[in-house]
Image (cartoon, rainbow, N blue to C red):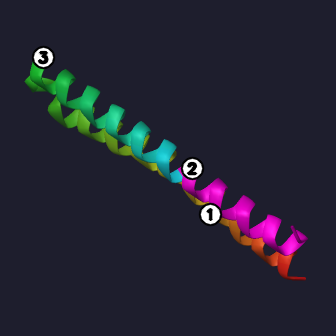
Amino acid sequence: MTPEGMAWLGAGLGIGLAALGTGIGIGILVGKSVEAVARQPELRGTLQRLMILGIAFVEALCLYALVIAILLIGKGAG
């Protein structure tokens, strides 16, 4: 397999696995936040802010993987 093909394969696998992990992570985070609000409804605002902050951090990891995938594709094409 050519280096360009390996770069495309690595980029595809990298972003695919990152998206899968991000989806699982956000699903767990939101599920646990809903459970926490069901237990203590008076803390809904605080828990919602923390949940959104957590989602932003998890989503940032997927964006880093996207940047690395784009760099891999650029290296393979050159």
Q: Secondary structure at mark 3?
A: helix
Q: Where 34 sits versus 17, above or below?
A: above
x and y percent of residue 54 in the render?
42, 39
Q: Furthest residue to the bottom? A: 78
- Residue range (magenta): 1-18
Q: Which mark is residue 39?
A: 3
Q: Residue at x 10, y 23 (%)?
A: 38
Q: Nearer the viewer, mark 1 or mark 3?
A: 1
What count of labels does the image hold? 3
Q: Furthest residue to the front? A: 1
Q: Which mark is residue 66?
A: 1
Whether residues under marks 1 and 3 lie with C-beta atoms below 8 angstroms apart, the answer is no
x and y percent of residue 32 in the render?
27, 26
Q: Nearer the viewer, residue 45 or 33?
A: 33
For label 1, the crowd category at 10 Å Cα-Cα, with few meaning under 14, some 14 to 19 and many 20 or more, is some
Left or right of residue 57: residue 55: left
Q: Quadrant of residue 68?
A: bottom right
The amino acid type of the residue labelled 3 equals Arg
Q: Earlier in the sequence, mark 2 or mark 1?
A: 2
Which residue is denoted by mark 2 in the rendering? 18
Q: Earlier in the sequence, mark 2 or mark 3?
A: 2
* Residue 70 within the magenta-colored segment of the rendering: no
Q: Residue at x 74, y 59 (%)?
A: 10
Q: Quadrant of residue 4?
A: bottom right
If the image is split into quadrants, where does the C terminus sit?
bottom right
For label 2, the crowd category at 10 Å Cα-Cα, with few meaning under 14, some 14 to 19 and many 20 or more, is many
The amino acid type of the residue labelled 1 equals Leu
x and y percent of residue 37 in the render?
15, 26
Whether residues under marks 2 and 1 lie with C-beta atoms below 8 angstroms apart, the answer is yes
